[in-house]
Amino acid sequence: MTDVLDPPVHVEPHDGGHEEHHGPTGILNWLTTTDHKVIGLSYTVTAVIMLVIGGLFAEIIRGQLATPNGTLVSLAQYNELFTMHGSVMIYLFAGPFAFGALANIIVPIQIGAPDMAFPRLNALSYWLYLTGAITMLSGFFTAGGAANFGWVGYAPLSNSLNTPGAGADLWIGGLLLTGFSAIFTGVNLVATIFYLRAPGMTMFRMPIFTWNMLVTAILILLAFPVLTAGLIMLYADRHFGTHIYSVAGGGVPVLWQHIFWFWGHPEVYILALPFFGMVTEIIAVFSRKPVFGYKGMIFATLTIAALSLGVWAHHMFTTGVVLLPFFSIMSLLIAVPTGIKMFNWIGTMWRGQIWFSTAMLMAIGFLFTFLIGGLTGIYLASPPLDFFTHDTYFVVAHFHSVVMALVLAGMAGLYYWGPKITGYLLNEKIGKAQFWFLFIGSQVFTIPLYILGLQGMPRRMAVYPHDPQWKMLNDLSTLGAVLIGLSTVLFVVNVVVSWKKYPAGDNPWDAHTLEWFTTSPPPHHNFYRLPQIRSERPTWDHNHPEHRALHHGEHEPAHENAGAKQ
Amino acid sequence: MPTPALPPQGAPDRSRRWRRVRRAAALPLAALVLSGCTVPGFGASAGVTESSKSAFHLWQGFSIGAVIIGALVVVLMIYAMLRYRRKGDHIPVQHQYHLPLEVIYTVVPILIVFGLFAATLVVENKATANPQTNVVVNVNAFQWGWQFLYPGTHALVYGQTTQSPTMEIPVNTNVHINLTSTDVIHGFYVHAFNFSRYALPGVVNQFTIRAQSTGTFFGQCTQLCGLYHSLMFFQVKVVSASDYAKWIASFNNPADIAAAAAALKTTNAELASGVASKNTYTKFGR
């Protein structure tokens, strides 16, 4: 039972503080649970395993490119590896980690809900995701190997004539399953956020992370069905004799690109917005200040989402069949709300009291890495510049700066929210070492790739016999990839070393939002009691009633300046 | 503070000061704009065609903006991190909004974006222009090689993977390219041209290149096209007009003539079947 207390006083729950959920335990619990926290944890573990698998593919790719005529893998294996590296990282790690793992765990607690709106649908989402992941990866065990047409699966390379193997079908099947998983999670998040907010939690008192997840969920609902339709048509072309994407029967190959990127560009923000939300929360908490420009931040998120639905063809500038100026200006405009976010993050740190915990370091690492990825993205919005960087390593470097920033943000999220869900903190020393490996590794990995791209090295090349002088920069990039790999090892070591060692308590960071008001880990239905919710920082307001956020132009009353209170 | 009314000579004074400021600012700016070679290349190179050079200058312009904005953000971040690192347990002032500041960092980026867009349009219209020309090359990409056919002549060059073909074109001449593919999507990319375009099955993509210096330039496929994608190379050899005429004339034995005629017939048949359609970009503002 949840009581809303006004004024907040501690009230024992009806069963004396020991409201326990009586259900199966152990493996049976994991198999049958509909608790969003357990499902979220399953998502987290699965997604991190996917990160490791995708990372191993990346290390093999970088190993192959360490010499101009690499022989670590064959040309055919190389095509499978980068296809599955991209597919695993995008479809099976980044998205599910954001909206399956962290959002699933955090959003209901942040808005004071007992669970997701549709707990069984939530469980179905997870099982679809796991099945999809296994389906996609099982391509490696087929005779023809896994899918090998790139993670974008461009037609007509992906048709049955050019890619006849079962690996391609398993890729399509796996993607359909994870796509449905994402759609169901989207439905669940929207319903949860609209209907299960605690009394007092108005829309403009929702934490930024929850806001970003709402927008992400809406984008999922708009974009993923399009991909699903496109995949079904691709499958029909492959097996039922349709000619939707093949010239021979009067079809249009470029149609696949339109459909794919109509999903694919919103997908970029489906991946990015959750991580923006995590970073926003973390920077505010560790600067001990409210989010600077809270409402501006929300409008920036909404603007990004709206624009993201009208920019897909900037991936297709060099096809020659799209209207360049429209997609150019729309893409350039995304820089504006993104810039607003960047300045708001700095504004949040400004005049704060910055505590450089591992989570905060990771978040700051995100800011730097994302700045590079964001600025280089502006070039790609300009067609003449895209003409000479498209499909070169410049593009690879650009989106790897962005995704490495997201990995940093995700790690920040794990260090920040992990203790809430497990009840135990991670080791800060190992965490900081992990940060430096990951941060420096990310830059050493990406920056040589920008230069390589500008020197003309195309992407998806297993060998580069014509330009052996590219070896030096490739080796540097490989070194960066090794550093990133080591940082992942450090993370696993940290989990093992810190296992049930450092109890976290309810609110180890003196944080702002509702999840820090309940116990770590929270009880089965999350709350025994709730504080008064009068801003987007109910826990902070409860702990520091004299330090509420100030409106524009409002100055701190004199009596509050005097007492430096903890 | 109320200021006394300016004396009559105040206005010219002020405008003179302005002129001086403007002159001081204009000099380095003009130098920056006019002498593209003194501005660093930021990793890119000017290339050898007319449009590769304008794309390069646009690149430099974008880079100057990116460096300035990036430096500003980095300085602000590092300053905040050093200056506001935690020194004690006291709680900082809980400021959350500063509307004028937020308006500034919304409006200024919008202005910058429209500036970048205007510069983009100018260069883009140049890059996608298709002026009249006498030299036409039909480029046909296939797994995993290239065919260069010169309609109206008997010249035909093709080759795949390790026997990469060479496309020969005259210098300082507009060369019109009709680009298509017979199987999957390929990418026609020459680094020295700062340019790439997809070769799409069923579509003829048209563009014009005007090389301004002679030499042999490396090109390769940039769009994943299957197993030997990494080895799908070609060369572009830019020669003088007389050398080009000699080269074209060298395709004179009956076997060459028959091969070129057959290749042209195949291409035309594809076009006539309605499968392939001619395509050029729709230009903006012209």
Image: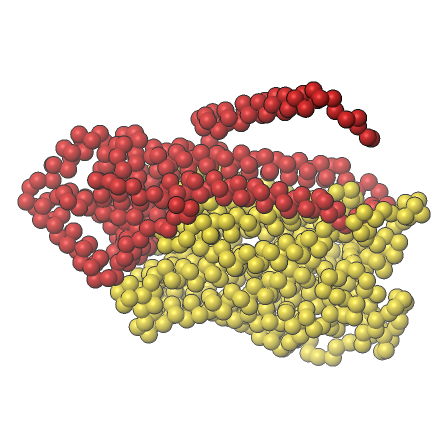
Chain colours: A yellow, B red
Q: Residue furthest front?
A: B8
Q: In the picture shown, does residue B30 fall above or below A271?
A: above
Where residue A170 sits: x, y (%)? Answer: 42, 68
Which residue is drawn at the image coordinates 12% and 50% (left, top)? B261
Depth check, front residue: A190 or B134: B134
Where residue B246 sits: x, y (%)? Answer: 14, 33
Depth check, front residue: A240 or A390: A390
Image quarter of residue A384: top left
Image quarter of residue B250: top left
Which residue is drawn at the image coordinates 42% and 60% (left, top)? A258
In-image side of A345 versus A549 (left or right): left
Depth check, front residue: A70 or B99: B99
Which residue is drawn at the image coordinates 39% and 62% (left, top)? A256
Where residue A364 sits: x, y (%)? Answer: 66, 45
Which residue is drawn at the image coordinates 77% and 40% (left, top)? B84
Q: Which of the image's four quarters has the N terminus of chain A?
A: bottom right
Q: State the count of labels.
A: 0
> Quick check: can you spot residue A284?
no
> Quick check: can you spot residue B58?
yes
Where residue B175 sits: x, y (%)? Answer: 26, 40
Q: In the picture shown, does residue B81 fall above or below A538?
A: above
Image quarter of residue A501: bottom right
Q: In the picture shown, does residue B86 fall above or below A207?
A: above
